[in-house]
Amino acid sequence: MELFDQLINVLASTIRLSVPLLFACLAGLYSERSGVVDIGLEGKMLGAAFAAGAVAAVTGSAWAGLGAAIAIGVALSLVHGFASITHRGNQIVSGVAINFLALGVTALLGQAWFNEGGRTPQLPGSARFLDVTLPFADSLRDVPFLGSIYANLISNQSIPTYAAFAAVPLTWYVLYRTRFGLRLRAVGENPHAVDTAGISVARLRYAAVIICGILCGFGGAYLAIAQSAGFLNEMTAGKGFIALAALIFAKWRPVPAMWACLLFGLLDAVALRLQGTVVPGIGEIPVQVFQALPYILTVVLLAGFIGKAIPPKADGIPYSKDR
Amino acid sequence: MLMRKLFGAAVAALVLASPALAQEKVPAVVYDLGGRFDKSFNEAAYTGAEKFKKESGVAYRDFEIQNDAQREQALRNFARSGNDPVVAIGFSFGSALEKVAGEFPNTRFAIVDMVVEKPNVRSILFKEHEGSYLVGLLAGMASKTGKVGFVGGMDIPLIRKFACGYVQGAKAGNGKVEVLQNMTGTTGQAFRDPVKGGELARSQIERGADVIYHAAGATGIGVLQAAADAGKLGIGVDSNQNALHKGKVLTSMLKRVDVAVYDAFTDAKAGKWSAGFKVLGLAEGGVAWALDDNNAALISADMKAAVAKAEADIKSGAVKVHDYMSDSKCP
C-alpha cells in the first residue's frame, strides 16, 4: 500500500512537470503541421511567463496574468509569422532570434520594473492558479486504489493542468475531424495543392502560428503563476527544446505527443525522488547519475526506439507561388 | 570667453562638491548571481552595505553580475576606478579575485565564503554548521512526524556543511529523527531554480517530512513556498526569511554576511583593516537563528530554552558541532 501511495505521488509529480512540455509540444505541433518550423517555443514561453508573472503581480489576478501571457505569446508568434510567412525568411533564424529576444528583454524589463534581479515579486495565493479539489475527492479518498487515484492524482491539480490535458483530444479532433484541420495538414504537406484549391496558404499558416502562440501563453502562465509564485530569469530552462524533441518522438501527432511529454515528466520526477537512494550492493548512487538519466534516455530512445520520424513535407520551407 | 568662465565654474563646483571623494575612497561590493534582492545571501550583503551608508554617510558602489564571465571584469573595474575596499560576495569569486588582487596590490579586497591567500585580501568564513545545528535542533523538536527535510542548492562541500550541522542539531532535538536530504543540482543554476526546489520539497513532504530547511538561495524560495502551500514548516537561510510566509516559516538560520560587509567597510574607513582570514561563528555573532513576530507562536518555551542552552554549550565548547569541510564526512 505504501508503495502504491509512492507511485501515486510520483505520477502526480509527473503530471505537474509535464504540463509546460505538453503546452509547448502542442503549440509546436500546430505550427509545424502547417509547415512553419518553430524553434522559438522556448522564447515564447519565457516571454509569456514573464508577462504572466508581471501582470499577476501588478493586478493581483491570475486570469489577467494568463491573458497577458497569451497576448505576449501571440505577439511573438506574429513576429515569427511576419518574418517567415510574409517575408519568407529562414524559420530557424527567426525562431532563434525570438529565443534571444525573450531571454534578454525579460531580464531587462524585470530588473527595470521590479528591481529584484529580474524576478517578478512573489505572488500571494489569490494571484496564482492554485490546486483545485474536485467534487467528492475527500469523501472518496478512502476507497482503495481508485479513490486514491482520484483524490491525489486527478483532483488537486491546477486549472491550466486540466486545460493542457483537455487540449490533447481537442487538438486531435481539430486536426483529424474538421475542415480547418484537413487544410492545416495539407498546407504542411503540399501548399501548392492548397493554393490551387483557392485557399490562402498565408492565412492558414498565420492561424496556425497564432494557435501556437496561445498555447505557449498557457505554458508560460503555468510556469510562472501555477507551478511557482512568480517569474524568474531563464525559468523555462530548455523546456521548449525538450518539447520539440517530444514532438519528434510523437511524429507530429497529438496523442503520442502527450505520452512523450509524460515520459519526460516521469523521468524528471523519478530523478528527483531517486536522489540519495541506497541500492543494495552498490551503495548510494551519485546524484549526477539521476540528473543525467533523462538525457541519456532521450538519446537512447531517439537512436533506437522510435523508428523513422518523418516531418510534414513542407515543414521549414517558405511558400512562394512561383516555385 | 563665456565658455571658459562656465568651464571654470564647473570645475570649481566639482572640486567643492567632492571633498569626501578626495580624502576617502568609495567602497564597493559585487554580488553573486542570485542578485541583490534574492531575499537571502546577497540581500544580507546589501543590508550590511546600506547600514554602513546610513551610519557613515559615505556612499558605496555595487554591481550585480549577470553571468560568470563578469566576475573578473566587475572586480577589476572597481579596483581600476579607485574603489577601496572591494568586497566580493560568494565562493565563486575565488579564482577571479586571486587574479585581480594580484594586479592591484594596493587595493584592499574582501571575499565571503572563500579563502584567497593574498596579502591584500581578507577572507571571511562562517561557521554555518553551528547556525544550522541550532535550527536543526528547533526542527527536530517542532516535527510531529519525526521526519525533517533538507534541500541544498549546488552539491558542494559548503552546502553539505549546512546539511551536516542541521542533521546533528535535529538528532539532538529528537534522538529518533529521520532527515531527508536532497541537493538541487551540480551547477550554479541549482541556486536559482525554485520550481525544482518546490518539487524536491513536495517529494520530502510526501515522504513524511513536516519541517524543511533550505540552503539553496533563490531555489529555496520554492522550497518555502511548497512547505507553506502544504501547511508544513520551512526554515529560511542567510537572511531572515520568516516574513516570506508568516506562521509557516519556523525560523531562519542567519548568516551575518551583513556584518562581514559592514565590518570590512568600517574597518577600512577607521584604518583598522586587516587582511588574512576571519572565521565568524556563534561566539563572534556570525551566525544566529531568527525570532520575530512572524514565528513567535511557533517557538515554544521548551524550544527556546533548549536552543539557548545549545548556544551556550557551543560557545563554551561543551558541544562541538562537527564541520563537514574539515574531513568531508558527516557523523
Image (cartoon, rainbow, N blue to C red):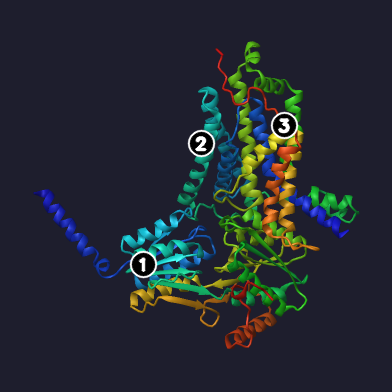
What amino acid does circle 2 point to?
A: Ala
Q: Which chain does tag 3 point to?
A: A
In three-dimensional space, the C-alpha distance between marks 3 and 2, rounded to whole angstroms, equals 26 Å
x and y, in percent, of residue A187 in the image: 65, 20
Residue type (three-letter) at the residue carrying disc 3: Lys
Give the SS element for disc 2: helix
Q: In the displayed structure, does residue B64 sit left or right of residue B185?
A: left
Are the residues flagged by discs 2 and 1 from a single subunit? no
| Residue A171 occupies quadrant | top right
Label for residue B279?
none
Provide the residue designation for mark 1: B27
Which residue bears the numbered disc 3? A251
Residue found farthest to the front:
A281
Q: Which amino acid does label 1 sit on?
A: Pro
> Are callouts 3 and 2 both on one chain?
yes
Quadrant of the rendering where the C terminus of chain B is positioned = bottom right
Assign a secondary structure to mark 1: loop
Q: Badge 3, how many Cα within 10 Å: few under 14, some, many 20+? A: some
Inter-mark Cα distance, 1 to 3 = 59 Å
Residue under circle 2? A97
